[in-house]
Image (spheres, rainbow, N blue to C red):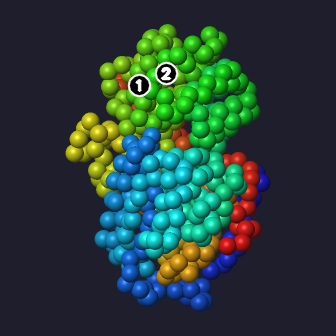
Amino acid sequence: MSQFTKNYVLPTRRNALKLLSGGGLALAASSTMPGVTRFAQAQSSEPIRIGFQIHRTGIGAAYGRWYDRTTQAAVKRMNDAGGINGRMVEIIAEDDGTDPKRGAEVVEKFATQQQCDVAFGTLFSHVVIGSAPRAGELKIPYFVVSEGHHVASGILNRYTLQPGITDVKSQVEAMAPFVSTNLGKKVAMIYPDFAFGHDHRDYFTAALAKNGGEVIAQIAIPPTETSFTKYFPKIPQQTEVLYHVMVGPAVLTFVKELGEFFGSNHPEIFGFIDSLEAVDIQSPGLEFLEGTYFWEGNPRYVQNNQTSHDKMYRTAVGVDESGASVSDSRDISTYAHMFGCWETLNIIKAGMEMSDYQGPQHRSRLIEAVEDMTDIPLSDDHPQGAKIFNGKTHQVFGHQYISKVENGRMVLAHTTSIEDTFYPDETDYTTQPF
């Protein structure tokens, strides 16, 4: 058993709280936990206010639009079931422009002007890094729906948690063995030149080396770039696998220009679906992707083994079997990422019910309740898959999916175990005072 796993299965620090079970968010029977009530009578008719830091504008806008749809659907489901501790949930949304400085200002507004109980929602890692210190200073729980390794690395603070989506380091730990075994040993990487891309660069390079491979080129591209052809000649001729992850509004241009550059004579290609989020894979010019592979946080296309939970979730967020909006087939969702909003909101709900949260005076109690979570089962609350939360590092770990493009759709080729994504703890936020 690894040190990580040992840390994970130790009894929790506070014996009053237990984790999610079945498909619900219930506490263990209160008779077994003196002094803890299951669903206490709400002491306020005021709503639970969740400050939603949304990328409405900037390079994260495509994600922000679908994060919003997912958030609204999750909250409707909660409120239809009675809210949290008998109180309705209200979303207070503010655009951060996908900008770190603006992000910190939005967090401050949530805490000081809008009486929000928690802040939630941020995706782009540079915005998380710019906003989290202010959340810590203002002592407002900050639940991010990002993928950067910033939370688990220990550079942030106890008020910042990522319990609903996995981080890049865990993703690439699970991807590297597949790439080296099935696609090739010599890899050229193309990634965005900011924190998220740097995580890919650093952690995939290390993970591949552990699996007998080598990254022979690291090509960083500004995230605001609009044309990419000038970067492709930097790909070495001996490249066996091209690893790409790109973000922003120009991703369709990126993949089209990649196809124009290589034509049918290209190395094996392994991409992160970020390069194709919100983009129809059957768009003209993307035919060269046939036979290539993608990491997906949640498979965009309905698979043969679809669960009832995925079916329920697709209906709730208004997405069809190919990952497009049911109201407009041209509107492709960010399906590989937006589940993190649904699942994080359900973690917030669970934590508030476990801690009998009544207001800002109970924020630290809420954080402690989430820190005590471990196993998170597959359910309607968590339709992407089962997960394990590490309360010390404030980071969740879960299954990863590798899909292959076949006949113009993505077909699931490999599902990793949760254990494939583990790495040793790098911090222990629970030792930090509130």
Question: Residue 5 location, x and y as percent?
Answer: 71, 55
Taking 266 as reference, is 208 left or right?
Answer: right
Q: In the picture, residue 41 is in which quadrant?
A: bottom left
Question: Residue 356 location, x and y as percent?
Answer: 51, 81
Is 164 placed above or below 352 here? Answer: above
Question: Residue 360 location, x and y as percent?
Answer: 53, 78
Q: Look at 61% across and 75% down and name the residue there.
A: 364
Q: Look at 42% across and 74% down and name the residue there.
A: 48
* Element on which disc 1 rests: helix
Q: In the picture, residue 218 is in which quadrant?
A: top right
Taking 87 as reference, is 140 left or right?
Answer: right
Which amino acid is tagged 1?
Answer: Thr
Check disc 2 and report the residue beneath it.
228
Check disc 1 and report the residue beneath it.
253
* Element on which disc 2 rests: loop
Residue 94 visible at all? yes
Q: Which residue is nearer to you in this view: 218 or 283?
A: 218
The answer to whether marks 1 and 2 mark residues whose Cβ atoms lie closer than 8 Å is: yes
Q: Look at 62% across and 56% down and name the residue there.
A: 395
Please give the count of numbered marks on the rendered protein.
2
Q: Residue furthest left?
A: 327
Is 337 placed above or below 403 here? Answer: below
Quick one: label 1, few (<14), some, or many (20+) residues within 10 Å?
some
Which amino acid is tagged 2?
Answer: Phe
Q: In the picture, residue 35 is in which quadrant?
A: bottom right
